[in-house]
């Protein structure tokens, strides 16, 4: 689960990580009042969306008077911000964060992530801050510093110094950097984060380090013990299809293609997607209805994949071991009765009660296209999707 910048910064402040003073607002008048309350002569108005790249997309505006604060807020609120991380539909801006403006001497990149290869928490830092770290990694990989933390020993002082010196910091800033890094490490562990990113971490005109941006992702499986963070969830920023799927306890991931898949078992679902791709098609989603699927859940799943306007064919691939094929068929038929279906449905059913399932589907009036095996199913789905697109 992603947090908004203002929520991440609140968390930073709790851990003693220096952040600019800011107030959240959901109207232009609120933004002006926020700026007035903060005081100072320069403010930054920042669109709160679950995506980076806001600066280049007009979602971060410097304002030198209160009118400019109001205008910047009015220009963002109620719109959808499109950045290189959002996709063309963008994300809705329902709130802006108004901060006291900071003078920037230098911009650095600093993040805490899980290094899965090493099985350790890693710090990634770069003196090329404020930019896309992926771009830096590609073009100038030598500018990226990395330190893996031993889980028993924890973050060591020498590692903090290694990073600080690598960034070109000296004197009091090295100690400041160490404090920030240790606090980030504590936050990462205690709050079950999967990513904490500060881009940019800046050196202010006064020579202090300050977290100018903040991005925190929390591991979904730990939300049960991070209640205060779970309460910060903002569904408006999430993929509506994935949200709907989560409500029905379906393992669903939206993809870009036009062939919807309904499969039982994550491995079979991935193999199905691979086969679609191999035969020249593109899957519209990953969907594992699971071994413990009920008729209701299958029905919800079928409606979910049908609701995607990009879909031009459906491939159902069920190997009934624990799950019964006839129950899957009943779920599909119930969904079709409710919402109707006008696109081709290719079905491959094997295993428990497969013949009964085929009978049910054939008798349902639904124009099902049977497939004999996985390759045949993928082939037919790709052909039908092409013909229907
Ligand atoms: P992002 O583009 O979504 O990552 O948003 P950021 O919060 O990182 O802001 C983008 C850029 O805006 C930063 O890299 C800074 O260059 C600039 N910026 C943000 N806040 C301030 C500020 O207080 N003062 C100044 N001068 N620039 C700022
Ligand atoms: Mn940023």
Image (cartoon, helix red, strand yellow):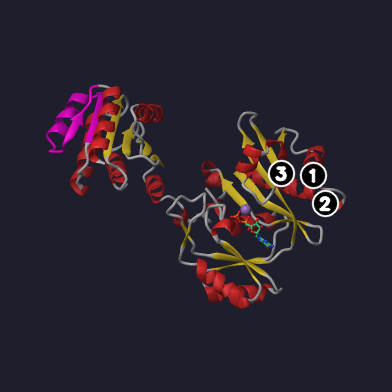
Q: Is residue 381 left or right of residue 126?
A: left
Local secondary structure at mark 1: helix
Q: Does label 3 or label 1 sit earlier along the sequence?
A: 3
Mark 2 Cα shell of 10 Å, populated few (<14), some (14-19), many (≥20): some
Local secondary structure at mark 2: helix
Residue under label 1: 164
The quadrant in which residue 332 appears is top left
Q: Residue at x 67, y 44 (%)?
A: 111
**Image disc number at residue 126:** 3
**Image disc number at residue 173:** 2
Q: Residue at x 66, y 75 (%)?
A: 37
Q: Residue at x 12, y 34 (%)?
A: 363
Question: Is residue 353 in the magenta section?
Answer: yes
Magenta-highlighted residues: 345-372
x, y (%) of residue 284?
Answer: 35, 39
x, y (%) of residue 124?
Answer: 69, 40
Mark 3 Cα shell of 10 Å, populated few (<14), some (14-19), many (≥20): many
Question: Is residue 296 in the magenta section?
Answer: no
Q: In this view of the protein, which residue sits in the foreground, 226 or 84? A: 84
Q: Is residue 181 above or below residue 100?
A: above
Local secondary structure at mark 3: strand
Q: Does label 2 or label 1 sit earlier along the sequence?
A: 1
The quadrant in which residue 301 appears is top left
Task: Work out whether residue 44 can be spotted.
Answer: yes
């Amino acid at each position: 689960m992603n947090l908004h910048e203002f929520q991440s910064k609140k968390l930073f402040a709790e851990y003693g990580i220096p952040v600019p003073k800011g107030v959240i607002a959901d109207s232009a008048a609120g933004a002006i009042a926020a700026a007035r309350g903060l005081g100072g002569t320069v403010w930054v108005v920042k669109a709160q969306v679950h995506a980076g790249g806001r600066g280049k997309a007009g979602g971060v505006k410097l304002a030198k008077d209160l009118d400019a604060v109001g205008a910047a807020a009015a220009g963002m609120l109620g719109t959808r911000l499109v950045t290189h991380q959002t996709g063309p539909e963008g994300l809705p801006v329902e709130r802006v964060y108004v901060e006291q403006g900071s003078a920037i001497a230098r911009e650095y990149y600093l993040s805490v992530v899980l290094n899965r290869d090493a099985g350790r928490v890693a710090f990634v830092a770069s003196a090329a801050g404020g930019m896309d770290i992926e771009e830096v990694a590609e073009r100038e990989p030598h500018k990226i510093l990395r330190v893996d933390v031993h889980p028993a020993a924890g973050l060591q002082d020498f590692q903090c110094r290694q990073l600080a010196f690598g960034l070109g910091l000296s004197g009091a800033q090295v100690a400041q950097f160490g404090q920030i890094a240790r606090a980030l490490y504590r936050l990462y562990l205690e709050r079950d984060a999967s990513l904490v990113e500060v881009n940019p971490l800046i050196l202010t005109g006064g020579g202090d380090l300050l977290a100018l941006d903040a991005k925190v992702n929390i591991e979904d499986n730990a939300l049960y013990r991070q209640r205060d963070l779970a309460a910060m969830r903002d569904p408006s920023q999430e993929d509506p299809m994935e949200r709907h799927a989560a409500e029905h306890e379906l393992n669903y991931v939206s993809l870009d293609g036009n062939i919807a898949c309904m499969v039982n078992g994550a491995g079979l679902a991935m193999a199905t997607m691979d086969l679609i791709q191999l035969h020249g098609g593109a899957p519209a989603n990953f969907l594992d209805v699971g071994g413990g699927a009920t008729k209701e859940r299958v029905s919800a799943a079928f409606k979910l994949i049908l609701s995607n306007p990009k879909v031009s064919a459906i491939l159902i691939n069920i190997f009934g071991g624990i799950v019964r094929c006839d129950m899957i068929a009943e779920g599909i038929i119930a969904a079709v009765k409710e919402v109707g279906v006008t696109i081709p449905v290719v079905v491959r059913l094997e295993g428990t009660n497969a013949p009964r399932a085929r009978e049910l589907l054939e008798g349902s009036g639904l124009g099902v296209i049977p497939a004999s095996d996985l390759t045949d199913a993928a082939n037919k789905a790709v052909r039908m999707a092409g013909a229907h697109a």
